[in-house]
Image: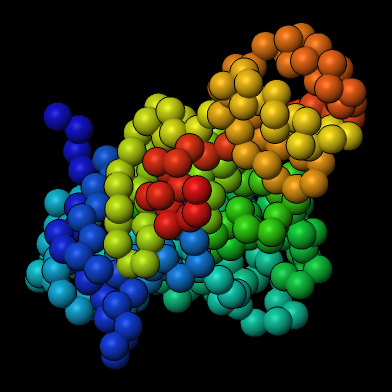
Amino acid sequence: MAEVAIETKKLTKRFGLVTAVDKADMHVIRGAIYGLIGKKGAGKSTMLRMLAGLQKPTAGSYEVFGTEMNGKCAGGARRRVGIVTEGWFTVPGWKLEDAVKRQCRLLGIPGKEKAEEVLGITGLKKYAGTRIEKLPEEKRISARIAFALCGSPDLLLLDDVFAGGNLQQKAETEELLKRLNRDFNITIVVTAEEPEALEEIADSFGIMDHGELRKELSADEMRALHETALRVRVSDVNALARVLVEQSLRHRILDGETAEIYGKPHITGLVTALAKEACEVISMEERTVQTESLLAALGGEV
């Protein structure tokens, strides 16, 4: 039976009258990459802070690697957890290597060798002498992860590390997380607003909405909640709608000239029917969309 890295039982966090996390039952297998998905305000960040011991739950309980986190042994388990949250925990103007050494000292770890190790793991050795604020944009997430690795964690909690990054940064971060998971057996929980942000790396997913952990899914189950849509732009969207109804094709009109068609339409037959309606096809593009089940779980509109 697979070892559980994280198990929460009715975990709850309230801030006054606001319930940020509401009776969440979360299960993360050791050695997995778990994607925690939800819109802003869903409770993802609060969940991670509780798991890292940065915030105390209002109710419920949780275990990390089998240790009850409000028990006597919680301190040892917390040292096995690294977290990356918003913001920088360093002094402006410091060089990256000096800042990492400082983080090591704060954790009671000899700084020089460990700093060199984490900079090597994260691909940042060549930037050791670079001031934090001068780091290339695509390297800043790696630098934040380097800080979290100073304590040699077995569990890494990453909050929104894919938000707002360019494609190069996303690709480099994905590769780094896969390597940390594969080569160092680090269990990873990473948050994102949309599952597409994590589809290349996550083994399983939890979906949060308004503080509730609505559903947990395997990667295969998550993929099954997506489907291919054909986005069609035409000269006459009303003619397109008539043809789609005649052909019993499920669809959605997006604007005055664009519609999405779901399922697997017969392209030649569709174009032929539109030509009979004197409707010109301007463009066609295949894209992946969320199904109604996933949208409902995410709290979105169908």
Give whichever of 22, 47 is nearer the camera: 22
The image shows residue 226 at horizontal and vertical percentages of 50, 33
Colour scheme of the rendered structure? rainbow
Compared to residue 93, the image places residue 296 above or below, namely above
Residue 41 quadrant: bottom left
Instruction: Determine the residue located farthest toward the left in the rendered image.
Output: 72
Compared to residue 148, the image places residue 252 above or below, namely above
Marker count (numbered): 0
Instruction: Determine the residue located farthest toward the bottom in the rendered image.
Output: 16
Compared to residue 264, the image places residue 283 above or below, namely below
**Residue in view at x 52 percent, y 39 percent:** 290
Q: Is residue 93 visible?
A: yes
**Residue in view at x 15 percent, y 59 percent:** 9
Image quadrant holding the N terminus, namely top left
Does residue 65 appear left or right of residue 263 in this picture? left
The image shows residue 229 at horizontal and vertical percentages of 63, 29
Does residue 256 appear left or right of residue 125 in this picture? right
Compared to residue 236, the image places residue 138 above or below, namely below
**Residue in view at x 86 percent, y 17 percent:** 275
Give whichever of 198, 236 is nearer the camera: 236
Residue 46 quadrant: bottom left
The image shows residue 102 at horizontal and vertical percentages of 55, 74
Residue 182 quadrant: top left
Does residue 31 appear left or right of residue 301 in this picture? left
**Residue in view at x 61 percent, y 53 percent:** 162
Give whichever of 259, 231 is nearer the camera: 259
Q: Is residue 288 visible?
A: no
